[in-house]
Amino acid sequence: MSVKIGFIVNPIAGMGGRVGLKGTDDVVDKAVKLGAHPIARLKAEEMLHEFSAISVNHHDVVWVTCDDDMGKNELEAIGIKNIQIVYAPKGSRTSANDTKNACKKFLESPPDLLVFCGGDGTARDIFTIIDKKIPLLGIPAGVKMHSGVFGITTNATAKMLQEFINKQLTVGDAEIMDLDEELYRKGEWKVRLYGIAKGIIEPTYIQVGKTCFESVSDDEVKDELAEHVNDELEKHKDWMFLFCSGGTIDSIAKKLNIEHTLLGIDAIYQKTLLAKDVNEEQILQLLKKYPKTKILLSPIGAQGFILGRGNLQLSPEVINKIGIENIIVVATPSKLIHTPILRVDTGDKRLDHRFTNQGYLMVVIGYRLSRVVKLQTNSF
């Protein structure tokens, strides 16, 4: 018996990440001018390739999709032939309206599952039309991915799709979250619950929403973390440091009287701001002058991502030039209680494999106090 899978790709998803725009909503032209390149098609094809490799019954799947780069091109690139086109975008550049109009077509003959490639904005647009009528499964390709419908990686998404088709997974409630990009670019993190969709229930593969942990004890720990980072800065005076996004890093910077962008990446040299809210190209230019560089990261709440979510400016080229041995991860102990695994999704399988081979990272949880935490990548 054949299974019908809806498939839709948001071609512009994730383009704002590496150029430091923290999203692509309403700023596609600016992203393109800054040198952004589409990544959604690559992510979609990666998932489809993984699925075809592990699924013995993938030939029984009927793919209901959209024309061009909204689905058909990605499916055909993998050699999938059982395709039904139900919607064609009107222009060369797609919009949220294309996503919504395609979803209206899906509802005319609902598929068993709707797989989409994008970020929170795409999930929100789909949910606006689909509501709880069709279960959703997201291929992570956006800059913002807080919603509970996304697979952790393309690999995990492929496994979930296979297990869903084999009736090994159940369907349940999943939060659709969205972040205000305009406020995000101004440094304010404001995520709201947009609605409750149907999603696939699999805690190993599905990411949970970002969780913030704040307490008096955490503040005390952050003082120790700041002291530890200060020692690193003193010990490596001729090194550049990239202070990445997040509340923990922001707290450390403030305690050290260093100017910092809460939701961006800043370049620091000798405790002084070199460049604010840098994108990938700016980092690569800085590395020519400051080849000795360390990256200061903190995991994203309960998701556990240190690379690949919210910091796409740290591209594979950037990471390879700096070296994974020069990554410093800091976190409070209370955050690690809810973050038992650190996740990496650089978009480069060779680089991900290097993290996989390493297996673990030392996470600084206090002054000269570290904890070993297991790593998980897109190659697990």
Image (cartoon, rainbow, N blue to C red):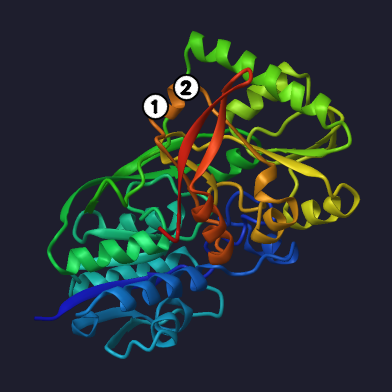
205 with respect to 245 (left or right):
left
Q: Quadrant of residue 72?
A: bottom left
294 with respect to 80 (left or right):
right
In this figure, which residue is indicated by the disc labeled 1? 337
Report how far apart the C-alphas of labels 2 and 1 lie in the structure. Answer: 6 Å
Q: Residue at x 51, y 55 (%)?
A: 357
Q: Residue at x 63, y 13 (%)?
A: 223
Which corner quadrant holds the N terminus? bottom left
Q: Where residue 334 appears, x then y in whole percent?
A: 44, 21
Q: Secondary structure at mark 2?
A: helix
365 with respect to 62 (left or right):
right
Q: Is residue 360 above or below residue 346?
A: above
Q: Are marks 2 and 1 in contact (CB under 8 Å)?
A: yes
Taking the image as drawn, is residue 210 in sight? yes
Q: Where residue 309 appears, x then y in whole percent?
A: 53, 48
Q: Is residue 219 above or below residue 354?
A: above
Which corner quadrant holds the C terminus? bottom left
In this figure, which residue is indicated by the disc labeled 2? 333
Q: Is residue 147 above or below residue 74?
A: above
